[in-house]
Amino acid sequence: MATIRLQREDFDAAAEAAALTRGRSDIGAVVTFTGICRGSEDGDPIAALTLEHFAEMAETEITRHVEDAQQRWALLGVTVVHRYGRITPGENIVLVVTASSHRGEAFAAAEFLMDFLKTRAPFWKQVESAKSKTWVEATAGDDAAAARWEKPRG
């Protein structure tokens, strides 16, 4: 079971986790990660983030990685909600919820999905400060975190 939504409006992480587990007795672990817009970047105040995307492309890529996570780990449910548009400090950006019988699978899958969303999901992020607007690229650290999940070729 997987739910993937791209939306402008905020989300309620607790309600999303509750919806994923409602009526289920086979789930023994739920991991939630919520990414929140910070108020500063490298000490500079942030006024807002603007996230742009191509809806069909983003949904297709996220679905592909959710399916990969479901093949790698024994997941009983996944929810990914990613916002787009203008987001101000303190507001939610992204939510990943993974459910499984045991915590190890849920933690690993959530981390895998966040590493993908941070580095390879087709979203473009612009940081707006009092001085300028700047497009943001994934960092080397973000890329290294995502690379550890790559399957060996052979």
Image (spheres, helix red, strand yellow):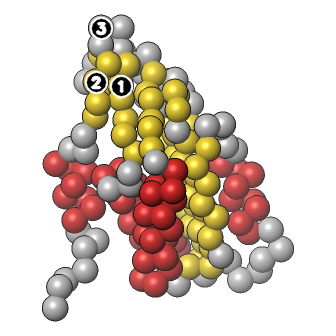
Mark 1–mark 2 CB contact (< 8 Å): yes
Quadrant where the image shows the C terminus: bottom left
How many neighbours does mark 3 have within 10 angstroms: few (below 14), some (14-19), or many (20 or more)? few
Q: Counting residues from the N terminus, which is met first, the one under dot 1 or under dot 2?
A: 1
User: Cα distance, mark 1 to mark 3?
Assistant: 11 Å
Residue 8 located left or right of residue 89 = right
Label 1's element? strand
Outermost residue to the top:
130
The percent position of residue 141, horizontal first and vertical second, equals 20, 50
**Residue at the location (42% across, 82% down)?**
72
**Residue at the location (17% across, 85% down)?**
153
Picture quadrant where residue 5 is located: bottom right
The percent position of residue 59, horizontal first and vertical second, equals 51, 59
> What residue did someone put label 2 on?
134
Picture quadrant where residue 49 is located: top left
Front position in the image: 116 or 39: 116
